[in-house]
Image (tube, rainbow, N blue to C red):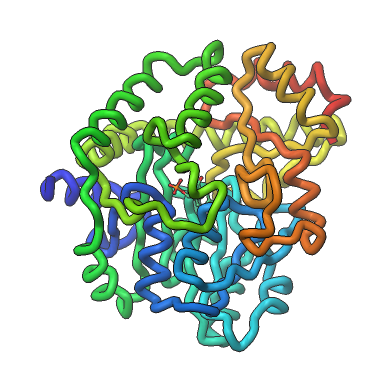
Amino acid sequence: MNLIVNKYKIELSKILNCNPQNLFLYWKGRVALYAALKAIGIKENDEIILPAFTCVVVPNAILYLKAKPVYVEIDPENYNTNFENIEKAITKSTKVIIIQNTFGLSSQVDRIVVLARQNNLVTIEDCTHGFGGFYNGKPNGSYCDFAFYSTQWNKPFSTGLGGILQINNEKYYQKIKQLEKEKIKPSLFEKFILKSLILFNKLFINERTHWMLVKFYRLLSNYNLIIGSNQGSELNSLSMPNDYCKDISSVQVNEGLKSLKKFHLINANRKRNAREYSKFLNSKNKKFVHEKLFDNHLFLKYPVLTNDRKKFLELAEKEKIILGDWFLSPLHPIKGNLKIWGFNCTNFPIATSIASKIVNLPTDINDNSKVLRFLSNHLDLIE
Ligand SMILES: Cc1ncc(COP(=O)(O)O)c(C=O)c1O
């Protein structure tokens, strides 16, 4: 295992432009975030600033340490937090700022990092959507003390499930090394199931089967009947799953090495498709993401706001268009009450409104003509 792990780290470091020894691998991205928070020494009542438009597993990692997530409103232009809102949220108890590359976009990372240093705060870049993208000429993940990445099903490259932590501040290296000893090894059964799911995904998920199989997979994983992206307890409580701090497996490392070979090709598609969606939406006077915002970024998904998401998704399913449904709620994928995560929707009108309208267009496809035709036929449903 050590040999292929080292090879995988070397391949990752070529893209991330970092020292392979500063990369650590986990079963999921959220475990990498949790490890970073532990290494920083986060404890009860410490405050962690994060976007009010994220995946629920991010506040979960904070709450498992009894710390307090402090959500910050997002900017409707780029779906990320901005400098001013973060500055207002800093208090004496703030310890960390999490900066997210939502849909692959990043913004004001350098300015926010300077602000954090001035206030003696640690920075973590949530690059789960942004692996391989650039911000101001440097790869995403280069600016903060830590960066973490996800290689889950829909991410820039996939190993089924998977997480990577990058340390840029050597001060935390020994602590992360120490935490390595606490990682639980995936069982043979888990490896077998994951390998089977990866194979099943390659063989059977296509335009025709996507919607049905994704719904079925999510249902099974919410009831813990399959190895899923989320376990039931992560979606309805603040209790940390028993086997949360899990190590990466050989299945994921081998899959990662294979996936990385196609990575540059897929990224070229992502940029081209995003540019074409922007051009199309702009020409129809619809909300689009300005090219200046993603010139160098990796556009994992292309966000579109609809005025009737239910209908838009139903039509997409009928016409076999694979759309993403992130982030259906400010704390994706929780649809109900967000109070247990300390989130009050009335305080975040922009994030809440966007979450009620958003769908994501695919960017990793070779031919986007079918998607453009679909948009063209349903312009009345797009904002
Ligand atoms: C913004 C964001 N952060 C963190 C994560 C967690 O990644 P993982 O599923 O690998 O734990 C996700 C998952 O999709 C995400 O969207």
Picture coordinates of residue 116 (x, y %)?
55, 79
The one of 322 and 369 positioned closer to us in this rendering: 322
Image quadrant where residue 276 sits: top right
Query: Residue at (76%, 46%) from the top-left corner?
Result: 354
Q: Give the quadrant of the C terminus.
A: top right
Quadrant position of the N terminus in the picture = top left
Q: Judge whether 375 appears above or below 127 on screen.
A: above
Residue 292 visible in the picture: yes
Q: Nearer the viewer, residue 114 or 345?
A: 345
Whether residue 79 is visible: no
Position of 340 relative to 104 (above/below)? below
Residue depicted at x 57% and y 72%: 68
Picture quadrant of residue 289: top right
| Residue 209 as seen in the image, left or right of residue 381 | left
Give the quadrant of residue 318: top right
Give the residue at x 39% y 78%. Answer: 41
User: x, y percentage for residue 296?
Assistant: 55, 50
Q: Position of residue 23 (x, y in %)?
A: 29, 59
Task: Reply above or below: 37 against 45.
Answer: above
State left or right for residue 162 relative to residue 113: left
Give the mark count. Answer: 0
Residue 73 position in % (x across, y down): 73, 63
Point 33% across, 34% down: residue: 259
